[in-house]
Structure formats: structure tokens, C-alpha cells
Amino acid sequence: MKKILLLFLLALTVSMTSCKTKYPNLENGLYAEFVTNKGTFVAKFYYEATPLTVANFIELAEGRHEMVDSAYAGKPYFNGLTFHRVIKEFMIQGGDPSGDGSGNPGYRFPDEIVDTLKHTKKGLLSMANAGVATNGSQFFITLKETPWLDGKHTVFGEIVLGQEIVDSIGTVETTKPGDKPVEAIVIQEVNIINKGVTVPSFTSEMEKIEAAKKEREDRLYRVAAATARGLSDLKELADELPSGLKMFWRHNEKGIKPKEGSKIRMNYSGYLTDGTLFDTNILEIAEKYDAVDPQKLDRGLYGPTVSDYSKEARLVPGFREGLLQMSVGDKAILYIPSHLAFGEQGIRDVIPPKADLIFELELVEIFVSD
């Protein structure tokens, strides 16, 4: 028995030493060697920028991930899986134990979106997912730049050796629909190569993320509570219109009144009565609530918004009524009862049913198109 154990340890040591000495020119860092039936390639991990994602991949590859389903526990997860989805001039995808895109390791973990890591070229290692915070074991490697994936998928490494192998896999014949290779592309082995760095721990990184999440939730709760108190105090001083809408004038300029049917520019922030922000076009407010939308920012949509100034404007009824009371330069707070907002239905995951709304609104100027 001791002899068998000794032989096993010797084989393991030889394997680890062999992998380390096979690539002597690799600089310090963490790497994964992918041995496939189409050839071998090596990826370098961005372990400092995306420690959670890298730790997840490494612990799966080495068969020591604590959260993995019992069916996969204690064995190298990726060995024997396939690149089950290949789309020419886009990407190759693997890491699914089911082999059809539906599988997972038995858990999910959050995204690690890093502004400086984008899908800017071929050979990038990125996590496949089914939406926000649904990462598991599936990953893909880009065959070209794919900027539409930025902000949605975690880039956590890049190919440093054997890109030609990845490229060749990207040209194999596939079934339609499904994009599954006609001849299976098997990941025979994934071997982790450590060149003198400390390997991140999935458990430790998750603990850091959970602590940061709790701190963020506490901070945003305090921000919302302070907003709610301020808006509630001012509601006592608001004027009530026959419809039930209440308005508090922060600044009543009594300036130029836009004509019916004209267009205006406005600034707005919308809140629930507990101070939760659900929409704004003011960047400073979005930043205060840690709610900046990257796509909205990229498209220049933070800033005065153009809107119709009309009884027929397609706006929330209470919002439209309040806006039509205002002149250029006016600033007001609109307290909108639910029947003048989104009523009994609300908006799924945004506005609860029967929710009263509060808007801070500024009519900036009359809009004149070029």
C-alpha cells in the first residue's frame, strides 16, 4: 500500500515538475495549459484584476473546488469536456459538463467586470453566462474583437501560446442550428502552471465580495433613508392639485412658458417613497447611488433629456401634469400617487405595484432642433 502511495506521489510530482519546465520562457504569473485533440495552447490568467474568476477556474481544473456539485467533486473538472459551441469569427465555448450549453458546476458566482479588460482582440478568455451574476464553469475564447460583450462578461485571461490552435478550432465544421462541432473537440487536460505567484482562493475572494456587498448595501440604505426624510419633510409644504398630484416648488422662476406641443429639455430623478432611486439623467445623482449605467454613459444620455411638452406627451400621467405646470428655469418636486403613476401593475423589478412615486424635476430650456 505504501509503495502504491509512493508511486502516486512520485507521478504527481513528475507531472507538476514537467508542466512547470515545459514552458521555461513564461514570465511570472498563473497559466492554464489546454491539451485538446486538436493541439495544445496556453492561457495567461489576469489573476490580479479578476482573482475570483481565476480562483474558480483553477480550483475546478485541479478538482478542489469546495462548492462544486458532488458529481464533480475531487476530480479535474474540465478534463474530458468539449468545446461544445464554435462560431466562426466569433468564439469557441467550453466548460459545460452537459456538452450542450445547459450545464453548470452546481453553483453561481458574481461577475468581475473590469473597465480596462474588454473584448478588444482575439484570444481573450472570458466567462459565458446567462445574465448578471450567473457565472459557473463555462467559458469562451474570442476569435476576434467582440465589443458588444463588454460589461456583460468577465474577461479573465488571454492566449499566450498556441493561438493558431484556437484559430483552427474556430474553423471546424459545425451543426446548424446549435453550432456544435461535427467532430468533438475534446479538452483532454487542463493543467495549471504557477510561475512564482500566490494563487487566489475562491472562498477568500467570495468573502471579500460579500463584505463589500454588505458595506455597499448599508451605504446605499443610508443614502436612500436620508433622501426619503428630506423629500417627506418637503411634502408637508407641497401644493395639492385636484388630481391628487402634489408639487413643492424648489425654484419658481415664472420664466418663459413653453407652448403646447413644443419640445423641452429637462433634468429628472425618480424615487420610491423610501428614497430608492429608480431612474435619473443626472450623473451626480447616479454616482451617489452607485447606479451609473455604462451604456447610458457611453451614449451620452446623462444630461438634459428632450421631451414633448404636451397634454398628449407619452409620460406618466402625474409627471406630465406636473411638467405642464412649469416654465423654463423652474425646479419642482412631484409627489405622484400610484393611480397617476404605474397603478396596480407597477413595473417588474423596478416599480412595485400600487407604488407612489416622487420626482425631482427641472425644466432646463425650450428645445430647438438644428
Image (cartoon, rainbow, N blue to C red):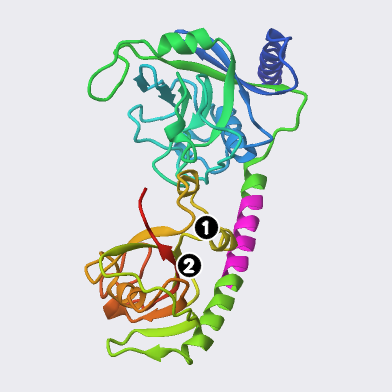
The percent coordinates of residue 25 (x first, y second) are 73, 10
Q: Does the residue at mark 1 contact the one at mark 2 (Cβ under 8 Å)?
A: yes
Quadrant in which residue 194 is drawn? top right
Amino acid type of disc 2? Leu
CA distance for labels 1 and 2: 8 Å
> In this picture, is 262 found above or below 27?
below
Residue 56, label in figure: none
User: Helix, strand or loop at disc 2?
Assistant: strand
Quadrant in which residue 247 is drawn? bottom left
Residue bearing the label numbered 2: 277
In this rendering, position of residue 188 left or right of residue 175: right
> In this picture, is 40 found above or below 53?
above
User: Helix, strand or loop at disc 1?
Assistant: loop
Of 9 and 192, nearer the camera is 192
Judge whether residue 209 is colored magenta: yes
Quadrant in which residue 31 is drawn? top right
In the rendered structure, which segment of residues is drawn in magenta? 207-221
Amino acid type of disc 1? Ala
In this rendering, position of residue 14 left or right of residue 321: right
Judge whether residue 321 is colored magenta: no
Q: Residues within 10 Å of mark 1 (few under 14, many from 20)?
A: some
Marker count (numbered): 2
Residue bearing the label numbered 1: 291
The answer to which of marks 1 and 2 sits earlier in the sequence is 2
> Which quarter of the figure is the N terminus placed in?
top right
Q: Residues within 10 Å of mark 2 (few under 14, many from 20)?
A: many
> Does any portion of residue 99 appear in the rendered image?
yes
The percent coordinates of residue 86 (x first, y second) are 36, 20
* Residue at image point 28% right, 78% down: 340
The percent coordinates of residue 48 (x first, y second) are 69, 35
The percent coordinates of residue 74 (x first, y second) are 55, 33
